């Protein structure tokens, strides 16, 4: 059976993949590790996948893991570098993440809720959620520092209305090969799960 590894983004969880999984054929075996931003971490089992799908920060998680480097991957609302720099003006200004990290230390819950609201995802957060400050802070640090260019995925999906990763940002990472989804924001997993699922099937069959 074909094995797919699904990696969620910052301030997300394994539950983010439910709608995509519901649109996948039954003959695909999916594994969804959890970074533990809201409690207990569930690490990757170590079973080698045939394909990795990274959502947002999940792309960097895939690229950073030494045992996953030679496996084809798909980027969903993803990037190989997040923060702007002298040679990467398309990225998000570092000062924004630096402010977020400071606010995270002062009020973790408010910082996460504000972020999720900005990408249209606050409705997916349980009111009883607990917050793992250590994991959340480590994730922000990786967003600030990681640069995995020029790694290229088998396919990149981006939203034309993504408030976090602009089309220019996606193009700077993936070139003209990035597929831009119309009316798509930063939550393609929820707004366009059938497109994400179809992309997975297409790459598996290619």
Image: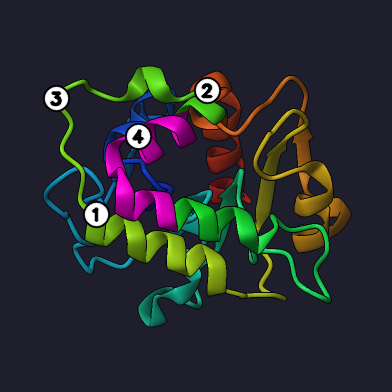
Task: Indicate the quadrant where residue 24 lies.
Answer: top left
Report crowding for label 4: few under 14, some 14 to 19, many 20 or more residues within 10 A (C-alpha).
few
Label 3 sits on a secondary structure element that is: loop
- Which of label 4 and label 3 is nearer to you? 4
Label 4 sits on a secondary structure element that is: helix
Report crowding for label 1: few under 14, some 14 to 19, many 20 or more residues within 10 A (C-alpha).
some
The residue at which mark 4 appears reads as 110
Residue 192 appears in the figure: yes
Report crowding for label 3: few under 14, some 14 to 19, many 20 or more residues within 10 A (C-alpha).
few
Report if residue 103 lies within the magenta region.
yes
Which secondary structure is most common in the magenta stretch?
helix
Mark 1 or 3, nearer chain start:
3
**Which residue is found at the position 50% from the left and 30% from the top?**
189
- Seen from the viewer's position, the closer of residues 205 and 69 is 69
Per the rendered image, the range of residues in magenta is 102-116
Asked whether the residues under the numbered discs 4 and 1 touch, taking CB atoms below 8 Å apart as contact, a structural biologist would say no
**Which residue is found at the position 16% from the left and 55% from the top?**
41
Mark 4 or 3, nearer chain start:
4
Label 2 sits on a secondary structure element that is: loop
**In this rendering, would 181 be left or right of 122?**
right
Report the disc number at residue 133: 1
Report if residue 156 lies within the magenta region.
no
Mark 1 or 2, nearer chain start:
2
The residue at which mark 2 appears reads as 120
Instruction: Work out which residue is located at the far bottom of the displayed protein and give it.
Output: 66
Q: Quick check: 195 above or below 172?
A: above
In the image, residue 152 lies at what x, y percent? 69, 67
Report crowding for label 2: few under 14, some 14 to 19, many 20 or more residues within 10 A (C-alpha).
some
The residue at which mark 3 appears reads as 128
In the image, residue 187 lies at what x, y percent? 54, 30
Label 1 sits on a secondary structure element that is: helix
Q: CA distance from mark 2 to mark 4?
A: 15 Å
């Amino acid at each position: 059976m074909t094995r797919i590894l699904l990696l969620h983004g910052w301030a997300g969880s394994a539950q983010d993949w439910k709608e995509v999984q519901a649109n996948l054929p039954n003959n695909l075996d999916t594994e969804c590790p959890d970074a533990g931003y809201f409690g207990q971490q569930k690490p990757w089992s170590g079973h080698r996948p045939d394909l990795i799908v990274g959502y947002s920060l999940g792309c960097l998680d895939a690229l950073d893991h030494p045992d996953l480097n030679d496996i084809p991957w798909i980027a969903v609302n993803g990037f190989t570098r997040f923060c702007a720099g002298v040679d990467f003006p398309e990225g998000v200004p570092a000062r924004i993440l630096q402010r977020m990290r400071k606010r995270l230390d002062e009020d973790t819950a408010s910082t996460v809720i504000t972020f999720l609201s900005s990408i249209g995802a606050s409705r997916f957060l349980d009111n009883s959620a607990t917050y793992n400050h250590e994991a959340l802070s480590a994730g922000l640090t990786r967003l600030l520092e990681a640069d995995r260019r020029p790694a290229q995925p088998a396919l990149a999906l981006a939203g034309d209305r993504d408030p976090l990763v602009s089309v220019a940002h996606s193009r700077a990472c993936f070139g003209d090969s990035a597929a831009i989804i119309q009316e798509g924001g930063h939550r393609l997993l929820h707004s366009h799960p059938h497109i994400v699922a179809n992309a997975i099937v297409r790459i598996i069959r290619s």
